[in-house]
Structures are given as structure tokens and as C-alpha cells.
Image (cartoon, rainbow, N blue to C red):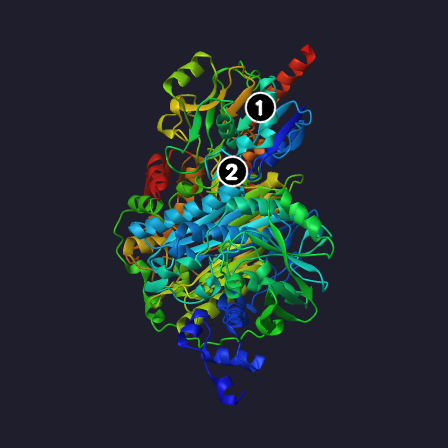
Amino acid sequence: MRFGIAVFPGTWSDRDCAHAVSLDGHEAVMLWHKDRDLRGVDCVILPGGFSYGDYLRTGAVARFAPLMESVAEFAARGGLVWGICNGFQILCEAHLLPGALVRNASLQFRCEPAWLRIETTDTPYTSSLAAGRVLEIPVSHGEGRFVADEATLDLLEAQRRVAFRYVAPDGSPVGAASPNGSLRDIAGIVNEQRNVLGMMPHPERACEPLLGSADGMELVRSVAASLARTASFA
Amino acid sequence: MTETTLDTLPSERTLQEVALTGDEYRGAVRILGRHPNEVELGIIGALWSEHCGYKTSKPLLKRLPTTGPRVLQGPGENAGAVDIGEGLAAVFKIESHNHPSAIEPYQGAATGVGGILRDVFTMGARPVALLDSLRFGPLHEPRQRYLFDGVVAGIGGYGNCIGVPTVGGEVYFDESYRHNCLVNAMCLGVIRHEALTRAVAAGPGNPVLLVGADTGRDGIHGATFASVELDEQSEERRPAVQVGNPFLEKCLMEACLELAGDPRIVAMQDLGAAGLTSSTAELAWRGGCGIDLDVSRAPRRESGMTPYEVMLSESQERMLLVVERGHEAEIAAAFARWDLHSEVIGSITDTERMVVRDGDAVVCDLPLEMLIDEVPMRHPEAQRPSNLDALLARDPLAEQPPWDMDTALLRLLGSANIGSRRPVFRRYDHQVGDDTVIPPGGDAALLRVKGTRLAVAVTTDGNARYGRLDPRRGAEIAVAEAARNVVAGGAEPLAVTNCLNFGNPEKPEVFWQLSEAIDGLAAACEALGTPVVSGNVSLYNDTTGVSIDPTPVIGMVGRIEDVERRLTAGFKADGDAVLLLGPQAAAELGGSEYQRLAHGTAEGPPPALDLALERRVQDAVREAAARGLLRSAHDCAEGGLAVALAESCLLGGIGARITLAEAAETPPDRSPSRTAGILFGETQSRFVVSVEKESGVQLRALLDQREVPYREIGMVGGGHIAVEGVLDVPLDEARAAYEDALA
């Protein structure tokens, strides 16, 4: 498959994402923020980082990048757009996903292991995994607390759009050990069409046993399998 | 002009501002044959400061070993470089940002990180890791908590934003640093040998580009500020502290890395201490050239800046490039892609002079040789502190212990100097880059090198309590301990970068400490085969006349040929044998963390160190690791054997049952603190290793053959840290104390 990886000034997970997808045999294509051409990619990854320094509000400047116009069109056509960390923040700012990511409840940056429970397998990112399975994927952010009004949260639940929730390693509720205090322990959500995913944890850092976990690779494989299915039906 | 006018000195205030003595000023006049003007005096003051010119430390630094078969670049460049195999080099350096951090902790620490990153990517190497080494006063004091929080936030703020992982470091709290916190930052990069870029100007007529941030009034006199003592008025120096912009530096870094190795780039040099002044002078003089600058062309942040201010500004995130003539527009376009502004501000000449113009007017014309090679050296008197004998005479074992051994272990594990560093490193992104194999929290951090089986181990170490008692041995121990941390990961120590944090060297006692410590560094680096390839000196860590304890900080880099042969510190499996390697049954409490906690002092002889034995033990551990004989390895450091055992238990999540006959013995004449000395004494050259029963025979044969003392002291298993007859602490209790220490 061909993964497009967005590079804004200040993006720093771009090379990690490229490395991770290439480990599974996929092609990584860097997409420069000033360009509009998505170069025929099958899936766009908006990686982690501090786009444009994020001095204003995370993702607030990146949403206006020329590249993001094409990404929004691509998403509207059903293309897969996968926002990780800063990418999730950008997707919320761009209104491709609801809610917002605000400062961690601890008021501090947190880089540590996190455990995510698969809440729905009805997305291209999780369709190859078993519901309820717990993945170990680290977080690394200062502003990852997912918030939305009650009605939006209820809608997300009703439409089974919560993709991942933070849990304890054994799958039980995370409680006070939440890395950021996200409402309803939400770690990742999809849009109504289920082709756009935003998640705060970093699956690209969990793609090799050498680095402590290979659970993130399951998401890459799931995306690749979904894309292969779509292609064979097309 | 007459003799008398040449002899006239400027006002005391002027001399103070440029941190020159009257004699040094007269020396400058003698070389020039005239008085320097205001701009020239500022430039001379900056380049002749301790910070840039090493006028006190240079004669001593010559004693350090700086060469070796793996050294690709020794001291004198922006960073040192060593061969790590497969055509790759590790590029690294440590630097202090003590004075700015004492005034403004967040920005002081942040810009310290920014500066050390530039030193590494200036060499063309992509930074892959950051480390720190921090010292503060007692943590329960609100101001120290404020400084500690601010510094940690500043390091994280810069490193996290730019996307270079902070993978290790150390932090200690001691009275000695109440008025002078220490903030040392280290950066490690990796590069192919042939892409190493140097900061050597060449080709008269080649244009000089200034890239990155605009030049503002921030940080003027930073270099001279760092070369005097702090006092009550130091808060007023806040304008001498710069403000960091990690986003801008990220763009600068990516643009520079895209251009590294490009034949159109002749040289790259970052702007650090003394800004344009030192960067242009050093760049030109390394190449035996001259340089001609026009400050009116430097983009500025504010109007009305004088040439003096432009030349001495320490505005961050700026870079200087010498470009092949005719290619300046292409290079400017490469930077513009990253929205970076660049401007040609001058050219390389063959005059060996530094000429600065402001439009048409020449405001400075000085010989470079004078600025760089004729720095007036200071040779202060050295004198051993008179109170040392009394300090050393104390017998630490004669004290009555205030606690039973269980309580003592819990106190140590829960102390600010030993407890878990997790509250610090969870605030640092330590994973970005996808290379961190061993994260912070164990011994050395380990980073794999993608596309190879290689991994690089890296650590920072220092211990000032030994240094106060014996600066030479303290420095030896700092090197030995850094190497031990690298070896505990299964890696081979390669080379050292050092940061020498000392008090005012004009005091004979401080100069003696500096001289002794450098001798210690030299001896240990020699014995362990780890040359010094880069470093930094931070003197004048004094406030109102009180000096810090001598604090040489060592950054050490090692390599491991096959990352799968790495070791970690945590115990692995029930039933594994636990061995203590190195000196057995010693009870050295002088200068130990136990002594400090239990008795509130650091007195008596510091631990002995036999460098030949140290080398034998380290080599044996490394060979055992390479042969796959060990399950875990951890060095004994602060808190001694008992804390090392506890850490291996906590990291592995499993207990251990230990027998130490000598600790349980009760001969009638024994010293009251002997058991504490055995458990918590900080005897050097020791590792706690665990080994599968089946590998035990081969390990013993190896240790016998290498003449390494060892003893099987127990077995991994259970839920307690237990030493028969003297200590029994449930793991949960130990963990609670350990995790709570810095929270």
C-alpha cells in the first residue's frame, strides 16, 4: 500500500511513521504542507509533532495549510485519514472530527506506556482486531485530554465511534491512571463515515518488540487489509 | 600618542562589564598598539572570557587524553565524534547553562538544550538523543522546587517540541547548589563518516550567510555573565538570559541536515555564547582566514541596535554558513523552503583579521590571532583546603545508626537523590525517533541504529560528595561510574564528553580542586580507554562568595555490536542466581548517601578506587554479556549494594533472597555502623548480576580467568527484598517509597 505522510513545519513523527509502515512492506510518501497533490496515496497519516510550533492552539494553524484542503477533499471522498497525536488535534481543528484536545489534567507533558481497549471493530483501522482486545501503545503529549459536550459524547457512543479507550493493562477502567484525563477515557474516535480516525497514542512507536511493543503494527495491518478489500471490490 | 595615554585604563565599570582585569586590558593595548574602541573591547572581553577563551582551565585541560583509534574528531570543534562501526559516527557534546537557569529556570534550561542541539547538527549529524545532569538545593525548599520544576519543564518544553528524545540524565539535591543550580545538557547525534561537516572557513571571497532568527538585544554579555560570580544583583541580569524558540530551531535543524554534506556548503557554525563575535572569529581562524562583516545587513528584531549589540547578542536559533561563491541564492532558497530568512552579512578574506563594518564605517578591525590564540592565560595559585584533613579523619562507621536496616533502606529509596526519576522523565518525550531500546530509569540509555544491528549506549554521571572530600578521586569515580553504566547495558565504553562545574577559580582552593579533578579525569579516562572528545567548563558557580562542591559531570558514549546482546538492570526470573562482582565485604560509608541521610554529613574517606580492577570487572561483564551468560546487570552506586539489589527487584518486579554472612555477624568489637556500611556503603567497581543456573559454571570460569572477585550472594524470587538476618522489606513497600520520592 501507499501511505502519504503529512509534513508540516514542526512535525516530528513523520519519519517514525514512514519507518513503521515500511516495516510492514508499504511505501511511504512524504506530503509537504505547501503542496496540494496527494500523489495517489491510499491512506493519509497526519503524524505527531508541534505543527507550526503550536504556539497558538494545537493544530490551529495547520488546518489552514494548503495540504489540508486536499486532505479534507480526500476524506469527503471516503479516503482514509489517520491522525495521530498532533494529527488528531489538527483533525479536530479542521472539524473533520468533533471535540477538542486540551491540556492534560496533570497540566504536565506525559510520555509513558498506555493501554487501549478496542471499542469497535467497525472501522478500517480496527477491523482485523478482536473487540475488547487491549493494545499497549505509548502516549506522548501535553494536550491530549479529549473533551466534547455531553450530547456529542453520547452521539459518539451511540454511533459506536469511540475507537479506543484508555484502560488498565488488564482491561479494567483506567481511573486515576489516565494519562490525560480524557472524558469517558476516550483515546481515539472516528467520523460518521468511519474513514477518518484521530488517536492521541503513538502506534508508530509500538511496531517492533525491540521497542517494547509491536501492538501498533496491528493497526497498520488492519488498514492494509481494509484497503486490499476495498481495492478487490472496486 | 604618548606612553601615558596608552597606559590609561577605562573605568572600573567598563572593565567589569567585559570581565577583564586591568592587566588584561593593558595586554590588549600592547598587542594592538592602541586602545580598542567600544565594539572592539566588547569583542575582546567576550573572546577572552573563561566561557569562550578558557583562560583559566586551558593549561589544565591539556592533561586530558583526547586521542584514540576510534576518535574522528577531538576537542576544538562544535562537538566530538567517534567511530561506532559500519561507517557510522557518534557525535556528541555536553554543555552547561547554569547561570541563566539560576535566574530564569525555564528559558535557561530550554536554551541550554537548544544550544547543545545546534552543536551537534552543525556537524551534519541528526540529533538522536538528549540527556541532562541537574543539581539543585534541598528539594523541600520552595525556591528549589520552583527551580527544579522550571528546569525540567524547560528541558521538556524544548526537547519535546523539536522532537529529539530526552533519554537519560541525573538529578541530585544538595545544600551546595542552593544558590547555584547546575543545568548541563548533552546531545548525541549519528552520522555517516563522510558526511561530517566542520566549522572551518575557506576560500577568500566566499560569502557568509546568517540564517534563522533575527538578532535582538537578548543575551548580550551572556558569555561574560557566565564568567563571573552570581550576587544579589544577578536578578537584574535577566536580560542576559535568552528566550528559546524550539519550532524555529526544528526548521533550522531540518534545513541544515538537508544541506549537510552538500559541496556548496564550505562550513557551518552555530551561534552560541557571544553570538556573532565568537562564531565568526572561530570559524575564520580555524581555517586560517579572515572575515569581513557588515552588521547593518544582519536582520534585527528591533530598531536602534548598535553594532556592539548586534555583535554580542546571544539571540537563539541562528546559524552561520560559508557558501561557495555564486551559490548563495540557491542556498537561501533551500532555507526559504522552511520559511527561514537568510542574509549574506559578509565574506571570508585572507587578511587573518576580523573587520566589522556598519554600512560604510569600520567599527572593528582586530587580528584574529590575538582574539583566539593570544587569550591571556590566568595561572591562579592552587591550595588544598585547610579543612580537608579534619573532614577525612572522621570514621563514618563509628556513628550509632539512627534506624534499623529496613527503615534505612526505605529512607534511601524514598530520598530525593535515589528515588525513582519517573516523575521527571515522564515529562520528557523519550521515544520519538523510534530508536529508544532502553528508556530512562535503568543504567545507561540504549538507542538502536536503524539499518544495522548496532546500538549506542549513553549516560551522564557525576557525584560531588566524593569530590568535596577528594576532587581527584571524585572525578575518577565519575568516569568509572559512567563507564559502569554503559557496561551494565552490555556495551563497550568509547569516549567521554565532560562538563566541569566548579566555583571561582581565582580562589586557590577552587583552583586546586579543578586541577586535582582534571588529573583524576585524565587518569580514569586513560585507564578505561575512553578519551575526552568534547566538553565545556563552567567556573564561577559561586554566590556571595560561596562555591559549589567540585562537580565534574561525565557524558559517556558506548557501543554494542549486536543490540540483541543488551542487558537491563531488572531481575528476570525466579530461581536465577544473584552474584556480586568486584570488591567483596567492604564497608565504606564516607561521603555516601546513607551518611548524608542518617547523619547529615558527608565526611570521612570517600570510597577507594582501583582503576585496574575497575577495568577488569567491566571487561568481564561486557564479555559475559556478549556471550549471553547474564540475565541482568546493575552497578552499585548511591545507596550501595542494598539499593542496587532493591532497584534490580523493583525494575524486574520480583524479589530476592540474599545472604551476606559478614552483615549478620556480631563480633563484640565491631563498629556500630558496620552492617549499614556493608549494605549501604558505596564501594566502587561492583555489579549485581543475575544468571540462569545453567550459565553459572561458564560465568564463574570467565570471572576466575579474568581475576575478577565475585561471590554468589543469593537467589531471585519471592515478593521481598531480603538479606538474611538483617533486612526484609516487602517489594510493595519499597516501590511505594521509591515512586513517591520526587512526586
Q: Are marks 1 and 2 on the same chain?
A: yes
| Quadrant hosting residue B70 | bottom right
| Quadrant hosting residue B624 | top right
Quick check: B276 above or below A224? below
Question: Which three-letter amino acid code belongs to the residue tagged 1?
Answer: Ala
How many C-alpha atoms fall within 10 Å of the one at disc 1: few (<14), some, or many (≥20)? some
Quick check: B351 above or below A107? below
In this orientation, does residue A132 appear?
yes
In this orientation, does residue B710 appear?
no
The residues bearing labels 1 and 2 have C-alpha atoms spaced at a distance of 20 Å
- In the picture, which quadrant includes the N terminus of chain B? bottom right
Residue holding disc 1: A72
Which residue is found at the position 55% from the left and 43% from the top? B446
Quick check: B225 above or below B581? below
Mark 1–mark 2 CB contact (< 8 Å): no
Residue holding disc 2: A50
Which residue is found at the position 40% from the left and 23% from the top? A148
Say what secondary structure mark 2 lies in: loop
Chain letter behind tag 2: A
Chain letter behind tag 1: A
Along the polypeptide, which appears first: circle 1 or circle 2? 2
Q: Residue B541 at what x, y percent from top left?
A: 40, 63
